Amino acid sequence: MKFGVVVFPGSNCDADAYHAFKDALGQPTTYLWHKDHDLQGVDCVVLPGGFSYGDYLRSGAIARFSPLMQEVREFAGKGGLVLGICNGFQVLLELNLLPGAMLRNKRLKFLCQYVTIRVENDRTPFTRKGTKDQILRIPIAHFDGNWYAPPDTLKEVEDNGQVIFRYCDPEGRLTPESNVNGSLNSIAGLSNKNGNVMGMMPHPERAVESILGSEDGLVVLRSLLEKIS
Amino acid sequence: MNTLHDDAVLAQHNLTRDEYALIVKLIGREPNLTELGIFSAMWSEHCSYKSSKVFLKDLPTKASNVVQGPGENAGIIDIGDGQVIVFKIESHNHPSFIEPFQGAATGVGGILRDIFTMGARPVALMDSLRFGPLDNPRNRSIMEGVVSGISSYGNSIGVPTIGGEVYFDECYSLNPLVNVFCLGLAEKDKIFYAKTEAPGNAILYVGAKTGRDGIHGASMASQEFGEDTEAKRPNVQVGDPFKEKLLVEACLEVMERRIIIGIQDMGAAGLTCSTTEMPAKSGNGVEIDLDLVPQREKGMTPYEILLSESQERMLIAARPDQVPAVKAAFAKWDLDAVEIGKVTDGGRLKCRFHGEIVVDVPVTAVVDLCPAYQRPWKEPVTPARRAAAIAIPLPTNYTDILRRLLSSPTIANKEWVYRQYDHMVQTNTALLPGGGAAVLRIRGSKKGLAMTLDGNGRYAGLDPRTGGKAAVAEACRNLACVGARPIGVTNCLNFGNPEKPEVMGQFKAAVEGLSEGCRAFGIAVTGGNVSFYNETEGLAIDPTPVLGIVGLVEDIDRIVTPGFKGAGDTVILLGDNAEDFGGTEYLEVIGGTNDGPPPDIDLDREIAVQETLLQAITEGLVRSANDPSEGGLAVCAAECAFHSPEKIGCDLAFDEDLRPDAVLFGESQARILLTVRPENARRVLDIAETRGVPARAVGTTGGAALRIRVGGKLLVDLPVAEAYRLWMDAIPNYFAATKSST
């Protein structure tokens, strides 16, 4: 399976994602330049973390206009797998490939720390290797990760099973303290209705080797290799 | 007669009459205003080190692993396997006081450019920060601004901020210190230097446009400038981490492809510095056309263009045939690369503006011929032995003092700070911030890099020589505690006004102390920065030498952390306790007069203790290690408990005939608290004995409390959970109190 990591100007987790898919997962991986109109035949597009275009306006707001996003949109429309991590999640929201929007973290500070998240739906291409209610320890690093949506959108997202991960405490309980950035319903990861596009604020690519403190990110990466039954 | 510029103009340019006379002699005529500005900037204390260089000569700068010592943008140390580290620390104190956010942010931007300009990809940042006490809202606001400035720049550019230190003391209230360290990794055969090489080579300007920000001497009367010059803007430089991120990628790309000859960043003194230093190193000159310099505003004068300190700009020298490829590489990243001039014979900087030559000076005069001063200095008066100890009554409740120490911001947990820094990006951080030295793995090898920033202004204030030595000893000890051996040093020397003999005396003594320390450890200083004039309203900071020391870890899987690893382990103390009270956090917390001598530094003992630990680590015996520093043994043991995932306590006992408060809270140096499985205790004690290091088992890990006996009496008995809350909440509480709305 071939992975493509998109490089926007200001992406800074592109190399981390590249290493994770290529070295930790052992799959052919390539960079995709934002100015190109070529997905190079990849099976999964990864929008990495960072500060695309400096994120001076609104996180991800400029990146959505990158030439390559046209192909990404078409690819997603045809059921292609798209994973947005952190800034990549923000870009997917701006592209309207995922519902809702991001607000600043509830305490108005950048947060870099390990969090625990709970797998809510294990029947997606991103979580097949996990089990429902499994708890993963994965780091976050963001300023704008406070997911928000109007009540009807939220209801739809919940009813459709589009919520993939929620922030929880180490025992799996949803508490105000464990919802570090203040996201609605503690949502940490979200898919589209078809389940082929997912955005998540935690960084699975930062948790793929024991030397880094956790290998729980591999649950997401390895899920992508599972044959769809 | 020297009549072109009057005393007021010279004063505004910080040049003395004698210096002016020397300039006239060197260039063979009186300089025009623009040329005066060039000399003013390049002969400033900041660029020329004119007050400090006679003393800095003492620093050991040579060692077998040194590839590049002081004098370049950053130092370079060989780490084997064809790789080098490029690292440096620099201060951004004054800008951070005026405008904390941008001051700190541009400090990060500046040090990053020093590293990648040499061909190294920046892989780590650290910051040494000092603020006034947090009960003062102004200090909180400075701290908040500085931390978010660092966070904003470092996070955006994607270089992890993996460690550092934060201290609080009244002397930093009006003089906060912001010292920023950066380390990059490069291949040994791909290092780049600031050089121009052959005449005929092109000079390219890359990066952000030039504006009127940060112009040296910009307080010049406005009538001296062009008619259309706008009123002067505040001299605050504004950082653009996004632009710098693009610059990093583009510069590293042209260096990797070897399509340039030399490169230098435009930091202090901007275009002036790079257009004189680069040719000076190659024995050439440079001729540039100022009209070609990309400008952000209209009507800029030659003076302004040459002395602007706008951020995110670099100067490149390339062969004419390389120019198209360089331009294409920068265009890919949406950056301009503009050819603004040529390398010339004859060693002169010539600048053309609207067709006329407006600057014509020999580059060596500007770069190398600034006078060096042997400023008058006075040997510091150091406190008499034991004065403070006698004055303190014995406490009645030791547990309560431990509570107060753990709540003291200098000792308390700094998560409020480092949680705002992305410390994991680039996925190499093997040891997260919060517990001593930071550790990065080196991808593709078994090795790791440990690094730490250390300095203690209180010790140096009482005795600068000891303070200098202490900074080296503690930094190396922090490295030893994770299992690393020191390989190189960078220093940031923060002092008051060097024109005062007392301050110059402090400087001289501190440099001697740290030289002695570095020599003892066999490590070289490869560069750094001197920051004088840290004085506001006549109040100077304590002399604050901050050392950044990098260590090599041979086996990344063997790194040791401070947290207790399980119950039932034996706790061993390496080194001796003594009645050391001077400069301690204990005295500060109980409101004692901090006038005793700081703890003695015995460098031989220090090295023996660290070698004992390193050998024990190599033999795989050590489960945890931590060194008592601020707050002494009691705080050290508490930290070991806090860093254990299960918050394991310990039972310790000390029997020596010393004041109990000295045993618990004294800050004697050359001590390490480590844990081993009981069956390995004997072996560690034997290693210590062979090396002549006092060592003894002082207790065991386990339970849910910190219990410490001295002289048979249980003096400290504190539940770990309670202690942990105090330690964790101290700093956030100061900020929460002011923001009840969230």
Image (cartoon, rainbow, N blue to C red):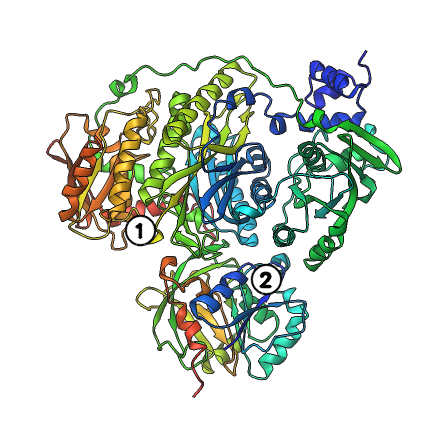
Residue A131 placement (x, y as % from top left)? 35, 77
Q: Residues within 10 Å of mark 2 (few under 14, many from 20)?
A: many
Mark nearest the camera among 1 and 2 is: 1
Indicate the chain on which mark 2 is placed.
Answer: A
| Residue of label 2 | A59
Whether residue B294 appears in this view of the structure is no
What amino acid type should be assigned to the residue bearing mark 2?
Ser
Left/right of residue B365 with respect to residue B248 in the rendered view: right
Left/right of residue A65 with respect to residue A6 in the rendered view: right
Whether residue B284 appears in this view of the structure is yes
**Cα separation between marks 1 and 2:** 40 Å
Indicate the chain on which mark 1 is placed.
Answer: B
Q: Is residue B39 above or below residue B254?
A: above
Residue B714 placement (x, y as % from top left)? 14, 37
Asked whether disc 1 touches disc 2, contact meaning CB atoms under 8 Å apart, the reply is no
Query: Residue extending furthest right?
Result: B355
Q: Which mark is residue B558?
A: 1
Residue drawn at x 82%, y 28% as measured from the top left: B224
Q: Give SS at disc 2.
A: loop
Query: Quarter-wise, where is residue B611 in the image?
Result: top left
Query: Residue extending furthest left?
Result: B712
**Label tally:** 2
Q: Quadrant of the N terminus of chain B?
A: top right
Q: Give SS at disc 1.
A: helix
Residue drawn at x 73%, y 33% as measured from the top left: B284
Residue B510 placement (x, y as % from top left)? 44, 23
